[in-house]
Amino acid sequence: MLNYEQQEKWSKIVPNWQSPINIDTLHTIEVNAQEKILSFDDEYRFINIVNKGNNLQYDGKGKAIIEGRTFDFQQLHFHFPAEHTIDGKSLPMELHFVHQNMIGQIAVVALYVELGEFSKELDSFFQDFPVNESEKDPFSATLSLNNLIASLGSGVYHYLGSLTTPPLVKNVEWWVIEKPITVSVEQLDKLKKRFNHGNAREIQPTNGRKIIHYVLR
């Protein structure tokens, strides 16, 4: 299990472009998206859930088309609090949908979560989970990312970074959905009470990276 209180020991040699970062909206490059930048299978199908000690990993299948390239969905996991901040503001939770294509490129679609109305779409992911670390259990659920993201009427921030857990793989494409989805206090508490120490990596320096803000039409 990762020790989030000793993150400085995760790696002695860390590349310059790491994640997560603070998204400074005054220094993003705004682009009006003429074509759909992100699209997903009508349904992502989830088949397993693994207790990673301070996280849950929901394994599944699905496909995403990102800038015309096909990526296979690998897994979903979460972080308390949200790892990426926007103008220094943090939200309660962040979901990471991890994808990989045939040549090994990794793309992570990040979705913020805030407290509000009950989420029917995400409710299956805020239920019971394996108690023992590394235990894998069957898990059956479906999710439409297309509908979920479209319902937000949101833009997306894009930059190049890394995974946020060791081995901190670099050259990861990040697609951070601008607006959060809401879940109820009761839904969030089902997970948060079991992961109350938090599992968010510290904010990393931007180091001159370009952050593109696609305005989705």
Image: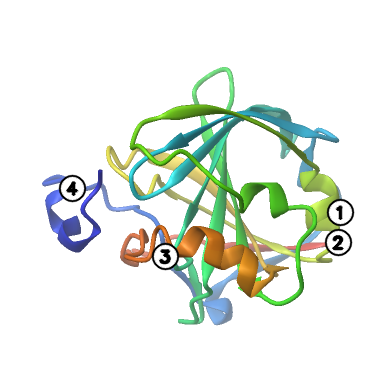
Q: Name the residue under label 1.
A: 34
Reading the image, the residue beneath label 4 is 10
- Mark 4 Cα-neighbour bin, 10 Å: few <14, some 14–19, many ≥20: some
Q: Is residue 20 left or right of residue 77?
A: left
Amino acid type, label 4: Trp
Residue 32: x, y in percent?
80, 63
Depth-wise, is mark 4 or mark 3 nearer the camera? 4
Amino acid beneath label 2: Ser
- Give the residue at x 15% y 57%: 8
Q: What count of labels does the image hold?
A: 4
Label 3 sits on a secondary structure element that is: loop
What is the spatial separation of the Cα atoms under label 4 and label 1, in whole angstroms? 41 Å
Task: Please state the horizontal and vertical placement of residue 153, each as a whole percent of the image.
Answer: 84, 66
Residue to which mark 2 is pinned? 151
Q: Quadrant of residue 44?
A: top right
Task: Name the residue at 15% across, 59% down.
Answer: 6
Q: Which mark is first along the chain, 3 or 2?
A: 3
Q: In terms of secondary structure, where does tag 2 sit?
A: loop
Q: Which of marks 4 and 2 is nearer the N terminus?
A: 4
* Nearer to us: label 4 or label 1: 4
Residue 48 location (% of width, % of height): 57, 28
* Disc with the residue nearer the chain's start (1 vs 3): 3
Residue 21 is marked as 3
Mark 3: amino acid = Ile
Under mark 1, the amino acid is Gln
- Distance from label 1 to label 3 (Cα)? 27 Å
The answer to whether the residue labelled 2 contacts the one labelled 3, judged by CB atoms less than 8 Å apart, is no
> In the figure, is residue 17 to the left or right of 145?
left
- Assign the C terminus to one quadrant of the image: bottom right
Q: Which mark is residue 83?
A: none
Pick the front one: 46 or 98: 46
